[in-house]
Image (cartoon, rainbow, N blue to C red):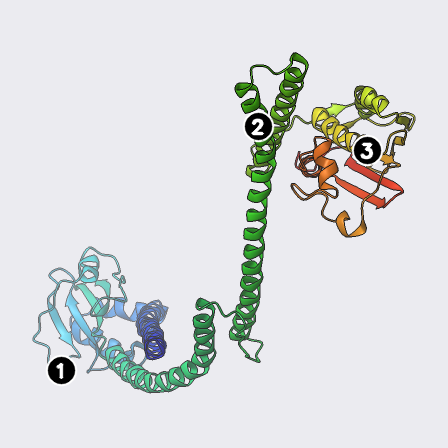
Amino acid sequence: MSKSLRLKLILIMLLLILLLMSVVGVFLIRGVQNFYTDSFYDQMRTVFSDENMASALRESAGEPDAVKRLESIVEAYSGLLGIDAGSRNYYILDGTTGKCLATSALDDSGSLDMTPNILTALAGSEGSEGSPNSRYMDVAVPVSGDEGSYIIYIRDNKHTVQTLNSELLKIILEALAIGIVVSAALSIILSRTMLQPIRSMTKAAEKMAGGDFSAKIDVQSDDEIGILSDTFNDMAGRLEQNLEDLRMSEQMRREFVANVSHELRTPITSIKSYAETLAENDDIPPEMRKDFLRVIQNESTRMTKIVQDLLELSRFDSGHTKFEFERFNLEQSVRDVCAALAPSAKEHGHTINLELEWQLPEIIGDSSRIEQVLMNLISNAIKYTPDGGTIDVSSGHSGDEVWVKVQDSGVGIPKEDLDRVFDRFYRVDKARSRESGGTGLGLSIAQEIVSRHGGRIELESEPGKGTTATVILKIEGPENG
């Protein structure tokens, strides 16, 4: 892997140098071509726009020896025109046929190609169009006189720019060769610097794959490699924590399955036992038969309640539970729940004291779900308070929240159990809970409902002195509701 990565780094650096020098070379060569072409046409335009030269050319065209006189004038301006027998020459052409009458080219055969600029001049207009990509540059200027019409034609074969571009290309190739050597050396040094922490990460990753998350990478740097190393170490710590969480989740799952099995086995065993007794004994007295059937009915109801609570928690976990959020009267809901549970409280000789704040604001929420929570809390207060106890239900608001408090004078909850009462199937007094028909799921469901409303449930308790449960809700409901 290390050799492969080092080779890749070297190839990337070489490719980068090659691309960079290629781009620079193209821009330089094109820049020279454009500059040389623009300079040529600017130079020609400046010289031929000189009024003295233009006047002299017109006068010479009217003389009997017009060609020689024209040639002498062009020769006089040869310095300004940049005439060079090697690359730039002038031609005196017949203005009617385009035939070459005189030239500065030493090896010229006397014939010229009819370029677009010459054709333009034969038509009577100045031809000065050109392209940086063409193999030559030319300008054709028509001159007319009494003795005839002529064309002053300047042609540059771009030998100078070609020579310059060849030198540039040579320099670029030399720079490319040096750049390749330097980039290869830098790539090797860079790869060694980068590969060391990567090797460390590879070894740590191999240990992690084997289940050992204790390996840490020690790279002291503030660059990306250092950040990557810190991130890797953080990831290893998180994976170790997640693995521990998974172990705990698996343990909780097993406990949950065991609790469900136990909770369902108890009523099923009772139902089976009483049903078998009824089936095997025809002489059971009617009163006893009724008692047996009542037990079967109660255990069936209890088992149904367990299944319903489990299904509801499952819907909470899967996110399939729907809430109907709307503004409703919380005061009326509290009164309705207390009225519904009054007969149960009376059976135990309890007194329910109701104290509600005047003009308690209406809130946004699912009224039936909130009543379910209150029903659960007040029912628990009734169940776990010795007969003849007192249950105080109060409500009020503070800022953007409302609260409903249920305070009993019951047995209370030990401090070590207080943080676990919302766990599923958890009971402080298991025997008493089953006797009272509890499933150990009511508080879990209540907490889920309140949490979906963006609220919370706070518990305060002291063994032997009672428990206070406070439901706190947002007046305007959950933020995403």
Residue 444 falls left or right of residue 55:
right
Residue 166, horizontal then vertical, whole percent: 25, 81
Dots 3 and 2: beta carbons under 8 Å?
Answer: no
Residue 314, horizontal then vertical, whole percent: 57, 36
The answer to whether one can see residue 342 in this image is: yes
**How far apart, in angstroms, are the residues tagged by discs 1 and 2?**
129 Å
Residue 461, horizontal then vertical, whole percent: 84, 44
Q: Earlier in the sequence, mark 3 or mark 2?
A: 2
Dots 1 and 3: beta carbons under 8 Å?
Answer: no
Residue 398 falls left or right of residue 188:
right
Q: Check the image and report above or below for 435 versus 416.
A: above
Q: Where's the N terminus, which quadrant?
A: bottom left
- The residue that mark 3 highlights is 381
Q: Amino acid at mark 2?
A: Ser
Q: Earlier in the sequence, mark 1 or mark 3?
A: 1
- The residue that mark 1 highlights is 106
SS class, disc 2: helix
Q: Amino acid at mark 3?
A: Ala
Disc 1 or disc 2, which is closer to the eye? 2
The answer to whether one can see residue 322 in this image is: no
Q: Within 10 angstroms of label 3, few (less than 14), some, or many (20 or more) residues?
A: many
> Which of the 4 image quarters holds residue 89?
bottom left
Q: Amino acid at mark 1?
A: Leu
Q: Residue furthest top?
A: 286
Residue displayed at 57% across by 23% down = 277
Q: Which one is in front, 476 or 39?
A: 476
